Amino acid sequence: MPPVPGKTRPCTRPRARQCRTGKTRVDQESNLRPFGQKSSLISILHPNHHHHLLNPPGNILSTSSPYSDSDFHSVSDMFNAPFVLLFALLLTLPLIILFAPHILPPKRLTISISDESDDLALFRRAVSSTRHRPGSVQRLGSTNAKPKIAFLFLTNTDLHFAPIWQLFFNPAKSSRRKLYNIYVHADPDSDVKSPGGVFENRFIPAKKTQRSSPTLISAARRLLATAVLDDPLNSYFALVSQNCIPLHSFSYVYNTLFQSQLPKPSRLSFTEPRRPSRLSFNEPSGPSRLSYIEVLSEEPQLWDRYIARGKNVMLPEIPFDKFRIGSQFYILTRTHALTVINDRKLWKKFRLPCLNVDSCYPEEHYFPTLLSMEDPKGVSEYTLTNVNWTGSVDGHPYMYSPAEVSPELIRRLRVSNSSFSYLFGRKFSPECVVPLMRIAGKVIFRD
């Protein structure tokens, strides 16, 4: 909502009191001065200065005064004016405090020059490392090395569901430890503590984040670049939040993503998810892997979000017919991860502050817009993270409570309107960890 201009109050100065009779005024020494006649500064301060210069007073205790009552009132009025204005300001201060948040747009975090410089240096190192090792991933089919999934945790609170993720990764199996990597970006202002276990020493250098600001895009790009740079075997990059839980076992997730060919499933009807077949990694993986990211183009609020920074600000790089919306959480291929961290053209638009903050969610637009423009056939256009938007509050999705956790809920969350099951679910309240742990072994990790 544009700010409503407030009414301005005209500033008036008090005028010296005037004699309504229009007659001349006689001072105590009978010096005549027509009322209203302009005088010099010394006359104003001492109207009888001529008399005193000729006849200096001999008695300083004399009760007679060289000043008239009108002069005292004029000087008093002039000196009281600032106090009147100050008093009026004090009276309006509570109103300013009360209505300012509704008139002025809330402040959103912007990307500082130093943070931008740090990120660009990281992105260049990540892209450069891939160029220096061009065959490290492409030759996976001809070696015994297996591709890995990089799990990217984006959080501004403690990882409440760490016990469930610990069971999911199950590091006790040595063969499984070679199939994944974990990276955590935690808002430094939130004092997030490491839960230990598989998350120990997996926190990356992080910057402050804020919802509905480009800082969330920067944080995700930071995670992607760190994972690309860290391990050339990272082939899929799954972005999850602290409120996400796995809906299947690790083996199920891994086999789903690394099948030899995943066609674009139809989204026209709800179907039971099919179980992925096991893939022999002695065979070439093929070029047809998809990134699983939601891409929508016909949402009713799309135009308002497009012009949130100004009517023509996104042009010419991003015309409206190319502007997309989708879930913030996705699973990207390595190729698309590099596309994201190597982008400069679209980022310079999405990093701009919004004028209409009520329609500003850059983290839901940048990734689907970029990837649908760069490689429309390489994205699934749907997400593998189940989010319930019915009954959302203040732009947040529905949050499940402990009383709702049950085997039936997990099975229901798995069902998608594509040919594949949802792999992750959100949003769960921290208190859900206890009932979820009770059904983890018998339900969540039993596919």
Image (tube, helix red, strand yellow):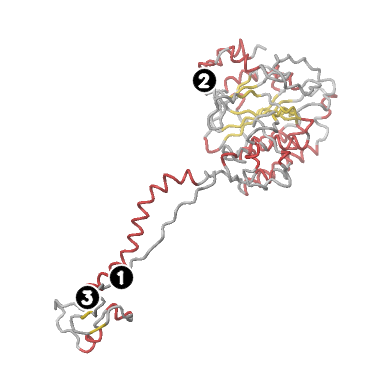
Which type of secondary structure does the marked residue at label 1 adopt? loop
Which residue in the structure is indicated by mark 3?
68
* Callout 2 amino acid: Ser
Question: What is the number of the mark on residue 279?
Answer: none
Q: Position of residue 166 (x, y in %)?
A: 61, 20
Label 3 neighbour load within 10 Å: few <14, some 14-19, many 20+: some
Q: Position of residue 304 (x, y in %)?
A: 62, 40
Q: CA distance from mark 2 to mark 3?
A: 81 Å
Q: Is residue 38 left or right of residue 200?
A: left
Q: Is residue 134 left or right of residue 219?
A: right
Which residue in the structure is indicated by mark 1?
16
Closer-to-camera residue (402/101): 101
Closer-to-camera residue (256/54): 54
Q: Position of residue 94 (x, y in %)?
A: 38, 47
Q: Mark 1 or mark 3, which is nearer the start of the sequence?
A: 1
* Callout 3 amino acid: Ser
Which residue in the structure is indicated by mark 2?
401
